[in-house]
Image (tube, grey):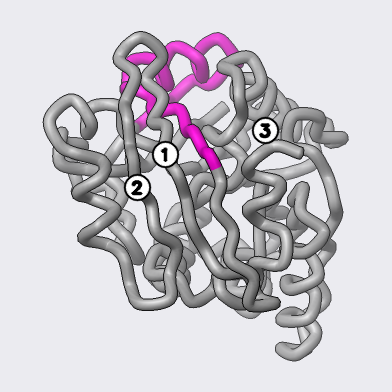
Protein backbone atom coordinates (compact mmCIF):
# COMPACT_ATOMS: atom_id res chain seq x y z
CA UNK A 1 0.00 0.00 0.00
CA UNK A 2 1.37 3.41 -0.97
CA UNK A 3 1.66 6.14 1.67
CA UNK A 4 -1.22 8.16 0.23
CA UNK A 5 -3.51 5.12 0.38
CA UNK A 6 -2.64 4.45 4.01
CA UNK A 7 -2.86 8.16 4.85
CA UNK A 8 -6.50 8.46 3.81
CA UNK A 9 -7.71 5.24 5.46
CA UNK A 10 -10.00 6.12 8.39
CA UNK A 11 -9.03 9.77 8.04
CA UNK A 12 -12.24 11.48 6.97
CA UNK A 13 -13.57 13.28 10.05
CA UNK A 14 -10.14 14.43 11.20
CA UNK A 15 -9.18 15.38 7.65
CA UNK A 16 -12.15 17.75 7.52
CA UNK A 17 -10.79 19.51 10.62
CA UNK A 18 -7.38 20.27 9.08
CA UNK A 19 -6.58 23.95 8.49
CA UNK A 20 -6.07 23.47 4.75
CA UNK A 21 -9.66 22.22 4.29
CA UNK A 22 -11.33 25.34 5.64
CA UNK A 23 -11.50 27.38 2.42
CA UNK A 24 -14.18 25.38 0.62
CA UNK A 25 -16.89 28.04 0.26
CA UNK A 26 -14.52 30.70 -1.07
CA UNK A 27 -12.92 28.25 -3.49
CA UNK A 28 -16.33 27.24 -4.81
CA UNK A 29 -17.20 30.94 -5.21
CA UNK A 30 -14.26 31.15 -7.60
CA UNK A 31 -15.28 28.00 -9.46
CA UNK A 32 -18.83 29.33 -9.87
CA UNK A 33 -17.44 32.57 -11.26
CA UNK A 34 -15.27 30.63 -13.73
CA UNK A 35 -18.34 28.72 -14.95
CA UNK A 36 -20.36 31.93 -15.35
CA UNK A 37 -22.75 30.36 -12.82
CA UNK A 38 -23.95 28.05 -15.59
CA UNK A 39 -25.66 25.23 -13.63
CA UNK A 40 -26.02 23.17 -16.79
CA UNK A 41 -22.28 22.45 -16.70
CA UNK A 42 -21.22 18.95 -15.63
CA UNK A 43 -18.31 18.94 -13.18
CA UNK A 44 -15.78 16.19 -12.45
CA UNK A 45 -14.07 16.42 -9.04
CA UNK A 46 -10.84 14.39 -9.24
CA UNK A 47 -9.49 13.26 -5.88
CA UNK A 48 -12.68 14.50 -4.25
CA UNK A 49 -11.74 13.14 -0.82
CA UNK A 50 -14.53 13.75 1.69
CA UNK A 51 -16.50 15.57 -1.00
CA UNK A 52 -16.23 19.08 0.40
CA UNK A 53 -16.05 20.85 -3.00
CA UNK A 54 -18.45 18.42 -4.69
CA UNK A 55 -21.03 18.90 -1.94
CA UNK A 56 -20.77 22.68 -1.94
CA UNK A 57 -21.10 22.81 -5.74
CA UNK A 58 -24.05 20.38 -5.70
CA UNK A 59 -25.67 22.55 -3.04
CA UNK A 60 -25.44 25.41 -5.54
CA UNK A 61 -27.20 23.38 -8.23
CA UNK A 62 -24.36 21.87 -10.23
CA UNK A 63 -24.25 18.27 -11.43
CA UNK A 64 -21.08 16.79 -9.92
CA UNK A 65 -19.29 13.46 -10.19
CA UNK A 66 -16.64 12.88 -7.53
CA UNK A 67 -13.93 10.24 -7.85
CA UNK A 68 -11.34 9.11 -5.31
CA UNK A 69 -9.14 6.11 -4.61
CA UNK A 70 -10.01 5.96 -0.90
CA UNK A 71 -13.11 4.00 0.10
CA UNK A 72 -12.87 5.59 3.54
CA UNK A 73 -12.91 9.13 2.16
CA UNK A 74 -15.78 8.30 -0.20
CA UNK A 75 -17.80 6.80 2.65
CA UNK A 76 -17.43 10.07 4.55
CA UNK A 77 -18.38 12.02 1.41
CA UNK A 78 -21.51 9.95 0.90
CA UNK A 79 -22.58 10.40 4.51
CA UNK A 80 -22.12 14.17 4.32
CA UNK A 81 -24.03 14.40 1.03
CA UNK A 82 -26.91 12.31 2.40
CA UNK A 83 -27.09 14.47 5.52
CA UNK A 84 -27.35 17.53 3.27
CA UNK A 85 -30.06 15.88 1.16
CA UNK A 86 -27.90 15.94 -1.96
CA UNK A 87 -27.58 13.36 -4.72
CA UNK A 88 -23.97 13.20 -5.89
CA UNK A 89 -22.34 10.52 -8.03
CA UNK A 90 -19.36 9.43 -5.92
CA UNK A 91 -17.24 6.66 -7.41
CA UNK A 92 -14.14 4.77 -6.31
CA UNK A 93 -11.71 5.32 -9.14
CA UNK A 94 -7.95 5.56 -9.69
CA UNK A 95 -7.16 9.01 -11.08
CA UNK A 96 -4.40 7.43 -13.19
CA UNK A 97 -7.04 5.52 -15.13
CA UNK A 98 -10.14 7.71 -15.38
CA UNK A 99 -12.94 6.02 -17.36
CA UNK A 100 -14.38 9.17 -18.94
CA UNK A 101 -14.23 10.55 -22.49
CA UNK A 102 -15.54 14.01 -23.45
CA UNK A 103 -18.23 13.92 -20.73
CA UNK A 104 -17.56 16.99 -18.58
CA UNK A 105 -17.54 20.75 -19.05
CA UNK A 106 -15.23 21.32 -16.09
CA UNK A 107 -12.74 19.19 -14.17
CA UNK A 108 -11.43 20.31 -10.79
CA UNK A 109 -8.58 18.81 -8.75
CA UNK A 110 -7.97 20.81 -5.59
CA UNK A 111 -5.79 20.56 -2.49
CA UNK A 112 -3.47 17.93 -3.99
CA UNK A 113 -6.36 15.75 -5.07
CA UNK A 114 -4.35 12.85 -6.53
CA UNK A 115 -1.85 15.04 -8.42
CA UNK A 116 1.05 15.44 -7.39
CA UNK A 117 1.08 12.61 -4.84
CA UNK A 118 2.05 9.79 -7.17
CA UNK A 119 5.41 8.06 -6.86
CA UNK A 120 6.57 8.79 -10.44
CA UNK A 121 6.27 11.70 -12.85
CA UNK A 122 4.72 9.34 -15.37
CA UNK A 123 1.89 8.51 -12.98
CA UNK A 124 1.25 12.17 -12.29
CA UNK A 125 1.10 12.78 -16.03
CA UNK A 126 -1.45 9.98 -16.41
CA UNK A 127 -3.74 11.94 -14.09
CA UNK A 128 -3.48 15.03 -16.29
CA UNK A 129 -4.10 12.86 -19.37
CA UNK A 130 -7.26 11.43 -17.85
CA UNK A 131 -8.55 14.86 -16.89
CA UNK A 132 -7.94 16.16 -20.42
CA UNK A 133 -9.68 13.14 -21.93
CA UNK A 134 -12.69 13.56 -19.63
CA UNK A 135 -13.37 17.09 -20.86
CA UNK A 136 -15.61 18.06 -23.75
CA UNK A 137 -14.18 20.31 -26.48
CA UNK A 138 -13.97 23.78 -24.98
CA UNK A 139 -13.90 22.35 -21.46
CA UNK A 140 -11.98 23.85 -18.57
CA UNK A 141 -9.59 22.33 -16.04
CA UNK A 142 -8.99 24.03 -12.68
CA UNK A 143 -6.48 22.57 -10.23
CA UNK A 144 -3.97 23.43 -7.55
CA UNK A 145 -0.55 21.92 -7.14
CA UNK A 146 2.64 22.45 -5.15
CA UNK A 147 4.71 25.41 -6.32
CA UNK A 148 8.28 24.31 -7.07
CA UNK A 149 9.50 27.88 -6.72
CA UNK A 150 8.60 27.94 -3.01
CA UNK A 151 11.20 25.46 -1.65
CA UNK A 152 13.96 27.19 -3.61
CA UNK A 153 13.48 30.28 -1.43
CA UNK A 154 11.78 29.00 1.73
CA UNK A 155 11.79 26.10 4.18
CA UNK A 156 8.97 23.60 3.62
CA UNK A 157 9.51 22.35 7.18
CA UNK A 158 9.00 25.84 8.63
CA UNK A 159 5.89 26.35 6.48
CA UNK A 160 4.25 23.18 7.80
CA UNK A 161 5.22 24.01 11.38
CA UNK A 162 3.53 27.41 11.07
CA UNK A 163 0.36 25.85 9.65
CA UNK A 164 -0.03 23.10 12.26
CA UNK A 165 -3.09 23.15 14.48
CA UNK A 166 -3.64 21.17 17.67
CA UNK A 167 -4.72 17.68 16.73
CA UNK A 168 -3.75 18.10 13.08
CA UNK A 169 -1.19 16.18 11.10
CA UNK A 170 2.48 16.89 11.87
CA UNK A 171 5.24 16.94 9.24
CA UNK A 172 8.93 16.62 10.13
CA UNK A 173 12.35 15.63 8.78
CA UNK A 174 11.61 17.38 5.50
CA UNK A 175 14.27 17.05 2.82
CA UNK A 176 13.83 18.64 -0.60
CA UNK A 177 15.58 16.90 -3.51
CA UNK A 178 16.72 19.42 -6.12
CA UNK A 179 17.16 16.72 -8.76
CA UNK A 180 13.60 15.39 -8.55
CA UNK A 181 11.78 18.36 -6.94
CA UNK A 182 10.31 16.02 -4.36
CA UNK A 183 9.90 16.78 -0.68
CA UNK A 184 10.38 13.75 1.55
CA UNK A 185 9.00 13.86 5.10
CA UNK A 186 7.63 11.88 8.00
CA UNK A 187 3.94 12.59 8.52
CA UNK A 188 2.32 11.80 11.86
CA UNK A 189 -1.45 11.89 12.35
CA UNK A 190 -4.26 10.43 14.41
CA UNK A 191 -6.97 8.67 12.41
CA UNK A 192 -10.70 8.67 13.12
CA UNK A 193 -10.33 5.57 15.31
CA UNK A 194 -7.77 7.30 17.53
CA UNK A 195 -4.83 5.37 16.11
CA UNK A 196 -1.55 7.22 15.61
CA UNK A 197 0.09 6.72 12.21
CA UNK A 198 3.57 7.65 11.05
CA UNK A 199 4.12 7.59 7.30
CA UNK A 200 7.12 8.19 5.07
CA UNK A 201 5.73 10.51 2.39
CA UNK A 202 6.95 12.34 -0.67
CA UNK A 203 5.27 14.83 -2.96
CA UNK A 204 6.33 16.31 -6.29
CA UNK A 205 6.64 20.07 -6.62
CA UNK A 206 6.25 21.58 -10.11
CA UNK A 207 7.51 24.82 -11.57
CA UNK A 208 5.12 26.82 -13.80
CA UNK A 209 7.00 26.08 -17.03
CA UNK A 210 6.66 22.32 -16.42
CA UNK A 211 2.91 22.57 -15.88
CA UNK A 212 2.54 24.75 -18.98
CA UNK A 213 4.46 22.29 -21.14
CA UNK A 214 2.59 19.25 -19.80
CA UNK A 215 -0.80 20.86 -20.45
CA UNK A 216 0.17 22.12 -23.91
CA UNK A 217 1.21 18.57 -24.82
CA UNK A 218 -2.34 17.47 -23.88
CA UNK A 219 -3.99 19.96 -26.20
CA UNK A 220 -4.94 22.75 -23.82
CA UNK A 221 -5.07 26.02 -25.73
CA UNK A 222 -5.00 28.43 -22.79
CA UNK A 223 -3.02 27.99 -19.57
CA UNK A 224 -3.05 30.56 -16.77
CA UNK A 225 -1.18 30.13 -13.49
CA UNK A 226 -1.68 32.17 -10.32
CA UNK A 227 -0.90 32.01 -6.63
CA UNK A 228 -3.38 29.82 -4.74
CA UNK A 229 -4.61 31.37 -1.52
CA UNK A 230 -6.71 29.28 0.84
CA UNK A 231 -10.39 30.03 0.34
CA UNK A 232 -9.64 33.04 -1.85
CA UNK A 233 -8.66 31.92 -5.35
CA UNK A 234 -8.27 34.86 -7.71
CA UNK A 235 -6.94 35.68 -11.15
CA UNK A 236 -5.53 38.84 -9.57
CA UNK A 237 -2.90 36.98 -7.51
CA UNK A 238 0.29 36.79 -9.53
CA UNK A 239 2.31 33.67 -8.67
CA UNK A 240 5.32 34.44 -6.49
CA UNK A 241 8.06 32.43 -4.78
CA UNK A 242 6.11 32.94 -1.54
CA UNK A 243 3.08 30.94 -2.74
CA UNK A 244 3.14 27.38 -1.42
CA UNK A 245 0.59 26.31 -4.04
CA UNK A 246 -0.26 27.48 -7.51
CA UNK A 247 -3.68 27.74 -9.10
CA UNK A 248 -3.85 26.47 -12.69
CA UNK A 249 -6.70 27.29 -15.07
CA UNK A 250 -6.53 25.59 -18.47
CA UNK A 251 -8.96 25.63 -21.38
CA UNK A 252 -9.25 23.22 -24.28
Q: Which residue in the protein does label 1 denote?
A: 185
Question: Left or right of 232: which side holds 65?
Answer: right
Q: Is residue 215 above or below residue 7?
A: above
Q: Nearer the viewer, residue 134 or 193?
A: 193
- Residue 72, located in which quarter of the rendered image? bottom right
Q: Which residue in the protein does label 3 denote?
A: 131
- Residue 147, located in which quarter of the rendered image? top left
Q: Which residue in the protein does label 2 denote?
A: 172
Q: CA distance from mark 3 to mark 1?
A: 28 Å
Disc 1 to disc 2: CB gap under 8 Å = yes
Q: Which residues are magenta?
A: 200-224
Query: Who's the residue at 66% across and 49% down the image?
Result: 47
Query: Who's the residue at 38% across and 51% down the image?
Result: 171
Q: Is residue 227 above or below residue 88?
A: above
Q: For the residue carrying disc 2, how many other residues have a C-alpha within 10 Å: few (<14), some (14-19), or many (20+)?
A: some
Measured as percent of width and height from the top left, residue 146 is found at 38, 37
Q: CA distance from mark 2 to mark 3?
A: 32 Å
Measured as percent of width and height from the top left, residue 234 is found at 28, 53
Measured as percent of width and height from the top left, residue 58 is found at 67, 72
Q: For the residue carrying disc 1, how many other residues have a C-alpha within 10 Å: few (<14), some (14-19), or many (20+)?
A: many
Amino acid sequence: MQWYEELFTDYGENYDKESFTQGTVGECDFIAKETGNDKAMRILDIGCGTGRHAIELARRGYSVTGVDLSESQLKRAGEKAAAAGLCIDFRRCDARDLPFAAEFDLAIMLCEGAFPLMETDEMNFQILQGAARALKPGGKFIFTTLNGLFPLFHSVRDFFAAQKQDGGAEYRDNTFDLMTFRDHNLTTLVDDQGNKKELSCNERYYVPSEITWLLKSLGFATIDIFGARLGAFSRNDKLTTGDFEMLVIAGK
